[in-house]
Amino acid sequence: METNLRHVIDEEVKWDKTKTIVSKTDIYGTILYANDVFSKTCEYSTIELIGEPHNIIRHPDMPKVAFKALWDALKKGENFHAIVKNLTRTGRYYWVITDFTIDKDSEGKVVGYTARRKAVPNGVVKKIEPVYKTLLDIEKLKGEKASELYFEAYLNEEVGKNYNDFVVDLFNEELSKEEEEKNKKEINSLKKGLNWFFFGEANPN
């Protein structure tokens, strides 16, 4: 498909941020399933998405080191969370927090991955975007390895957490702020954790 031919537009696509975007891939990242929310948000039909590499929605603003951290974790058998800026068919973007889980067959062999995505608070984007831009700039000027080493040092020295914990904590902190601003009495999503966030909807899509 025209992944590398799209004109990138600095405009967020309109989508229902109360919904969950779901996709399944094989171990190589080939899309096997995409729910209607995914198709509508990325502006491809489900038929167009099936059989395509998942990087069909990779936005050029995303540093490669973020995806390396993802694949390193999944190959170790670890579930993973990531904050990602994705690219739509028309060149627009949408930010999500993704919960990646590992799919296994009856014998325990890894056969693929399931990704569930939710919209993120604006505060998350404001904090993560400059970090990703720095990593991308290093990647372009100094190479992927330099970007990776910088990111490791950044997480150790300035954050004190690994990428997964950094993402989860950042999301929870910003969601908490949004909830406080709306004067909600309880923040059930934070108390129940991200597991509720991705799996506990009354009518998941």
Image: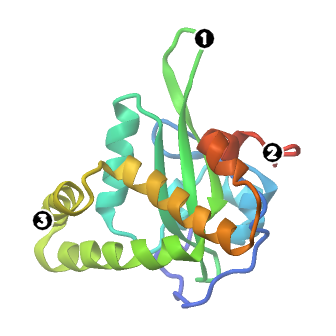
Disc 1 marks a residue whose amino acid type is Ser
Whether residues under marks 1 and 3 lie with C-beta atoms below 8 angstroms apart, the answer is no
Q: CA distance from mark 1 to mark 3?
A: 41 Å
Give the number of the mark in front: 3 or 2. 2
Amino acid tagged 2: Glu
Q: Earlier in the sequence, mark 2 or mark 1?
A: 1
Tell me the crowding category of disc 2: few under 14, some 14 to 19, or many 20 or more residues within 10 angstroms, Cα based. few
Q: Is residue 32 visible?
A: no
Identity of the amino acid at label 3? Ala
**Label 3 or label 2, whichever comes before in sequence order:** 3
> Would residue 180 appear left or right of 65 to someone viewing this image?
right
> Nearer the observer, disc 2 or disc 1?
2
CA separation, marks 2 and 1?
Answer: 27 Å
Label 3, secondary structure: give it.
helix
Distance (Cα) linking label 3 and label 2: 41 Å
Write down the residue under mark 1.
Answer: 106
Residue 105, position in %: x, y?
58, 17
Q: Which residue is mark 3?
A: 146
Q: Residues within 10 Å of mark 1 (few under 14, many from 20)?
A: few
Is residue 203 rendered to the left or right of residue 134?
right
Residue 185 placement: quadrant: bottom right
Disc 2 designates what residue?
201
Nearest to N terminus: mark 1 or mark 3: 1
Identify which residue is drawn at 18% across, 75% down. 138
Residue at x 71%, y 59% (from the top left corner): 38
Q: Please say whether residue 106 is visible from this viewpoint.
A: yes
State the quadrant of the N terminus: bottom right
